[in-house]
Structures are given as structure tokens and as C-alpha cells.
């Protein structure tokens, strides 16, 4: 198994250089690797990258000798989760109380 050059440099206290990728062109990440960068952050959190594009970028990074660091999106809660149902019930109860106050002149 190949050694992680980025991890080794960080453990030795060396300075490492990298960049954020939000495009899906594997050739660009290869150019960055050959230009001397140590890592590339593949940004799926704030960018439109599809997981298959991120996979291609990781392969290109591996070929160019640059470490890929993938930043993923935050997992969203299901709309029908228990906490979501609780929030919906609570907000509807609050709305009902406000309507009753208006009707009663409060």
C-alpha cells in the first residue's frame, strides 16, 4: 500500500500547500499535482459536484501524486423523523394559541 505523503509531511511539521476544487475536470487536478501542490480539497459541501465526479477527481489526484481530501455535505434529517414531527406539532400548537388569544381579545 502506498504511503500517504501528506500525512507524513504533516507529522514531520512540514508546510503543505493545497487548493479547493469545485470543478469536475480531472485534468485540472492532475495539473495541480504536477505543479507541486500536496493536496486538493474536493468540495462537495458547497459545490455542485456529483459523487461520481468526486471519484474521478480522486483517481486523477492519485495518478498525479496529490492527496485528495473530500469535504462532504452535511447529512440532512428525514422530514418525518420524530424530532421533526415534534417541532411541527409544537409550532401548530403555538399558532392555535395565538389565534385563540386574538378571538378572546387578548
Image (cartoon, rainbow, N blue to C red):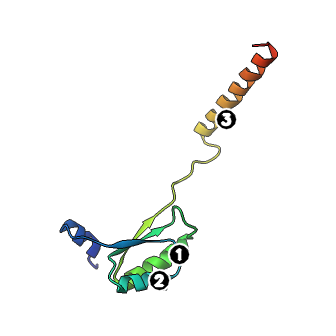
Q: Which badge, 1 or 2, is on the more N-terminal residue?
A: 1
The number of numbered discs placed on residues in the rendered structure image is: 3
Q: Secondary structure at mark 3?
A: helix
- Regarding residue 97, the answer to whether it shows in the image is yes
**Going by the image, does 7 lie left or right of 18?**
left
Q: Look at mark 3 in the image and give the residue it sits on.
A: 88
Neighbours of disc 3 within 10 Å: few (<14), some (14-19), many (20+) = few
Q: Residue at x 78, y 18 (%)?
A: 102
Task: Give 90 or 48, whichever is nearer the viewer.
Answer: 48
In the displayed structure, would residue 50 be above or below residue 27? Answer: above
x, y percent for residue 105:
79, 13
Q: Residue at x 55, y 70 (%)?
A: 49
Q: Look at mark 1 in the image and give the residue it sits on.
A: 23
In the displayed structure, would residue 37 be above or below residue 99? Answer: below
**Going by the image, does 88 lie left or right of 18?**
right
Q: Name the residue furthest right.
A: 103
Q: Nearer the viewer, mark 3 or mark 1?
A: 1
Q: CA distance from mark 3 to mark 1?
A: 38 Å
**Going by the image, does 46 lie left or right of 2?**
right
Task: Give 76 or 18, whichever is nearer the viewer.
Answer: 18
Quarter of the image that includes the N terminus? bottom left
Q: Which badge, 3 or 1, is on the more N-terminal residue?
A: 1
Neighbours of disc 2 within 10 Å: few (<14), some (14-19), many (20+) = some
Q: Residue at x 72, y 27 (%)?
A: 95
Q: Look at mark 2 in the image and give the residue it sits on.
A: 28
x, y percent for residue 2:
28, 79
Amino acid at each position: 500500500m502506498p504511503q500517504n505523503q501528506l500525512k507524513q509531511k504533516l507529522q514531520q511539521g512540514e508546510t503543505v500547500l493545497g487548493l479547493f476544487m469545485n470543478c469536475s475536470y480531472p485534468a485540472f487536478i492532475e495539473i495541480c499535482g504536477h505543479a507541486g501542490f500536496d493536496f486538493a480539497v474536493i468540495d462537495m459541501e458547497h459545490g455542485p459536484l456529483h459523487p461520481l465526479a468526486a471519484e474521478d477527481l480522486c483517481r486523477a489526484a492519485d495518478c498525479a501524486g496529490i492527496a485528495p481530501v473530500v469535504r462532504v455535505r452535511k447529512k440532512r434529517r428525514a422530514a418525518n423523523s420524530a424530532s421533526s414531527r415534534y417541532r411541527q406539532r409544537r409550532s401548530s400548537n403555538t399558532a392555535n394559541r395565538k389565534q385563540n388569544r386574538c378571538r378572546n381579545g387578548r
